Image (spheres, rainbow, N blue to C red):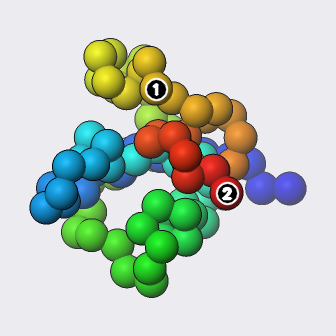
Amino acid sequence: MKSLTRYWFRFEKLPSASAVNLGCGVTAHGNEDALALLKERVFKKPTLPTILNWVADVDISKLDSKHVLPNLGNPVLRGVWFPQGFDG
């Protein structure tokens, strides 16, 4: 079984208000798996907005303490843990 990695993605700002403008947290079996989860669950299309940067093995404690940390899903399980609501 492949190990899981926590990723944090930052995108170019979306035109409409969205928690995604703060970033997206994903736990996946690698970069390709993380991108696939974002396409399937968050954006629901085969392309993603422009990725400004991404961090593998992100230290969750360093994320935004006012908006992101209080609203995390479970970063230990495979899936999208920020924003919540895209877990399947």
Query: How many other residues sit within 10 Å of disc 2, few (<14), some (14-19) or many (≥20)?
Result: few
Q: Is residue 85 visible?
A: yes
State the residue in front, 53 or 88.
88
Name the quarter where the N terminus is drawn.
Answer: bottom right
| Residue at left offset 20%, top offset 49% | 17
**According to the image, label 1 marks what residue?**
71
State the residue in front, 6 or 83.
83
Residue 55, image x, y percentages: 38, 45
Q: Amino acid at mark 2?
A: Gly
Residue 62, image x, y percentages: 35, 21
Q: Amino acid at mark 1?
A: Asn
- Horizontally, residue 72 falls left or right of residue 12, namely right
| Residue at left offset 29%, top offset 16% | 66
State the residue in front, 62 or 43.
43
Name the quarter where the C terminus is drawn.
Answer: bottom right
Q: Label 2, secondary structure: give it.
A: loop
